[in-house]
Image (cartoon, grey):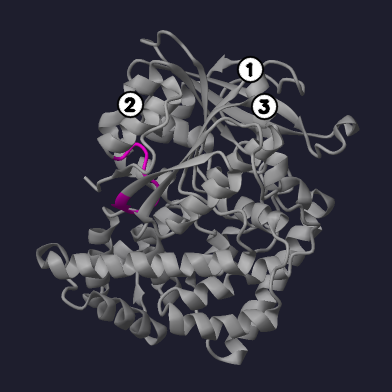
Amino acid sequence: MVDRRSRLAVVLLVMAVTLAGCTLPTFAPNGADEPAKPGGGKGTASAPGAPAQWKPCPEVPRELVGQGASGMTYECATVAVPRDWATPASGETYDIRMIRIRSKSQKNRIGSLLLNPGGPGGSGVDVAVYLSFGQALGGLPAEVTDRFDIVGFDPRGVSRSSPVKCISDRDQDASFSADPDPVSQADFDQVAALNKKIADGCAAKYGPQLPFFSTEQAARDLDALRGAVGDPKLTYLGYSYGTLLGATYAQLFPQNVRALVLDGAVDPTEGYVQGSEAQAKGFERAFTNFTKWCTQTPAKCPIAPDARGAVTDALAKAENSPVRGADGREATPGWIFVGLISSLYTESGWASLANAIDGLERGDAKGVFELADQYAERKPNGSYTNLFDANLAVNCADTEGAPSVEEIRRLQSEWRQKYPLFGAALAIGMLPCTYWTGKRDPYPAGPATGSPELLVVGTTGDPATPYENTADLAKMLGVGQVLTWEGEGHTAYPTTSCIREAVDGYLIDLKMPQEGLRCPAR
C-alpha cells in the first residue's frame, strides 16, 4: 500500500518549479509515435460541447494507491476539445481526461470543484484521487467534499490527455545526472548542444502542434470542461502553475467565474529571465531556512551545525568520486541537486535531506536517489512519466523573449555569485526554450475585469513560487485578495486550520477571509 500522505505531498508540492530550469534536461524522440490511450473508464470521448459521459473507474485509485477512499465513488470521462481554439472548425481534437469523485454523504451540492496541481505537467486526475482521502491524510476536508463533486483533469499534453512524449528514459537519466553548473566553456558548450538537440527533436516529432500546448489553449479547454460537467460558473482550485492557468481563465472568461483559489502564485507579469531569477532566490532562501533548522534542532539534523558546508562538500566530492547506488547509478552532482530541490518543497523534507547527505558521507546514496526519483517521477524500472515532456512543451509555447545563449552564459556567472547553490542551474535551465523552434503563444497578463473576487494564497517560505508573487498576481487581476500562510514549503491549502477555514468559507459560501489575514505556521 502506498503511503498516501507522503504521495499526496509529492504530487501537490513538487509540481510548480520550472522543471527544465532545475535539472538541465536533455531530450530526444523516444519512438513513442502513438499517444498513450486515456486511463480509467470506458468509451470514446464526448464530442466538443457535449456533456461528459461518466463511467465508473475504480481502477484508477486502485492503480495509484491500492484502493479508493471509503465513502467515495470514482467516475471517469473523456472530452474532446479543438486542438487550436482559433480554428475549431478544423475538426482536429485532443482528448481531455477527467475523474469525478463524489462523497456518498454529499448534500446541498453546490457543483463541481475542478483541480489543477501545477507543473505544468502535473496530473489533476492523480491529485484528485489523493485529495479524496480526506483531511486526516492531508486531503480535502469533509466540509468541501460534502458540497462539491471533486473533478480532476489532465490538461492537454499531460498524462492521460493526448500526452506529449519526446524524451527517452535514457536521456532523462543523462539530464538529471549532468552537472547543474558546467563551469568550463567546453562543458557549457556540450550542454548547449544537447539542448539544441532537444528542441530539434521535439520539433521534428510535433512540429506545427507545439503552440497548441500553451496555457491559453488549456484555459479555453477549462471552460469546455466547466460546460461538460454542467456548471454554469467555474469553481476552481489551482496550485502553483495552476494559479497561472486559473488567472488566464479569469481574464478570458470573467463572466464564467464563481470562485477561484490560486495557491502558490505565479506572476504572469514577470519576464522569463525575471521569473527564473525569482526561483533561484526563492530556493536559496528556503535552503537558508533549512540550515537554520539544522542549527536549532541538531538532534534531527546529522549534518549540523554546518549544513550548507556539508551540502557544498557533497556536491564537490561527487564531481570526482560519486557514490554508487544499488541500481548502479552514480550519485553525481546532478542527482544530488535534484534531491536537494525535491527536499525543499516541504518542511517535512528537511530531515530527509539531512539524512541523505549524511548517507553520502557514509557511502550510501539511497536517500539521495529516493528524493531525486520522487521529484523526477522516475519509476523503479527506470522509466519516467511524461511530466517533463509536457513541462517543456507548455513552458516554451508560453515563453516569449527567451535569452540568447551568450546572455545565459553571463547570467550563469552572475547568479552563481548571488545564489550560490541554485543561481547557475536556474540560468542554465533557460537553454531549452532558447533553442525552441515552435511558434510561441504567450498568455495574457492583465486584469480579470468583470470577475468576482478571487482568493490568492501565498506561503512566506515558498521556494518555487516566492511569496512576493502573491500580491503581484492579486494586483494584476484587480479582483484578487491575498491570504498569507507564515509557513515553509510550497503551497498552503489545506495545511492548517486557519488556512482551511479561510479557503473553505470562500469556496462554499463565497465569503472572503478578513483582508490581510496572516495564518501562523502551526
Which label sits on residue 48? none
Residue at screen point 37% across, 39% down:
493
> Which quadrant would the N terminus be assigned to in this image?
top left
Pinpoint residue 268: horizontal percent, then vertical percent.
61, 53
Residue at screen point 57% across, 59% down:
169
Q: Secondary structure at mark 3?
A: helix
Quadrant in the rendering for residue 189: bottom right
Whether residue 328 is visible here, answered yes or no, is no
Quadrant in the rendering for residue 66: top left
What residue would you read off at disc 1?
Answer: 232
Choose the circle earlier in sequence order: 2 or 1: 2
Q: Which-is-in-front pick, marks 1 and 3?
A: 3
Q: Are marks 2 and 1 in contact (CB under 8 Å)?
A: no
- Per the image, is 493 magenta? yes
Q: Circle 2: is it few (<14), some (14-19), or many (20+) Cα within 10 Å?
A: some
The amino acid type, in three-letter code, at marker 1 is: Pro
